[in-house]
Amino acid sequence: RLNLFGFFRYSLREKEKLHRREKLHIASAAAAIVKEGQVVILDSGTTTTAIARALRSFQNLTIITNAVNIAAELSGTPVEVILTGGTLRKNSFSLVGPIAEETLRRLNADLLFLGVDGFDVQYGLTTPNLLEAKVNRVMLEVSRRNIAVCDSSKFGRRSLSLISPPSSVHEVISDRGLPNTDLKALKKANIEVHLV
């Protein structure tokens, strides 16, 4: 009998192994931006989970997330966690739908770390799931500074659902494998680029 929860947890673990070193470097660069007393949004994903782990030692920090696994990562730490609520997606640990969106609309954040499945510098940031894209759009609206966190393999890729155009992010943290043409296009669009 196939244990679905075990299967999906396994698939998330498999994803975590992909570009693992880059994700850890991105996570520590992201954590270095965060200051005590801030409110930070983390969307669901393997890179943002790595960021959550890097923020565990903060004493005065509020994290808003739609990822059940990120909330679990931070339980037992001094970090205050606000879960959006919503409908649990079948194949991930993320909460989506109108409840998640409504909760986010009532909140404000200093920083958003957004992990994406695809980043086409002409088209925008994308994700495979339509409901996830809607939640991500609200996150971008309620945060003061939006930072896309994605390893270089995500560039030049388009996933099913558009989250937003590149202009909705202020900064990108990626690794040195980022194609030069993409780097130039991001800088031309006045997006700060931090390569680790």
Image (cartoon, grey):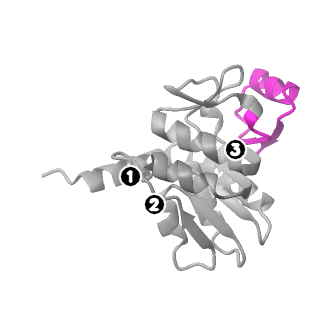
Circles 1 and 2 in contact, beta carbons < 8 Å: yes
Mark 3 = which residue? 141
**Which residue is label 1 attached to?**
88
Whether the magenta-drawn stretch holds residue 141 is answered as no
Q: Nearer the viewer, residue 174 or 171?
A: 171
Read off the magenta span: 168-196
Give residue 30's quadrant in the image: bottom right
Q: Position of residue 178 (x, y in %)?
A: 71, 31
Going from the N terminus, do you reach mark 1 or mark 2 first?
2
Amino acid on which the number 3 mark rests in the picture: Glu
Q: Amino acid at mark 1?
A: Leu
Relative to 111, does residue 180 appear above or below in the rendering? above
Label 1, label 2: how far apart the Cα atoms are: 9 Å
Q: Say which mark, if any, is on residue 68.
A: 2
Q: Position of residue 3 (x, y in %)?
A: 21, 54
- Is 30 displayed left or right of 191 in the figure? left
24 up-or-down from 129: above or below: below
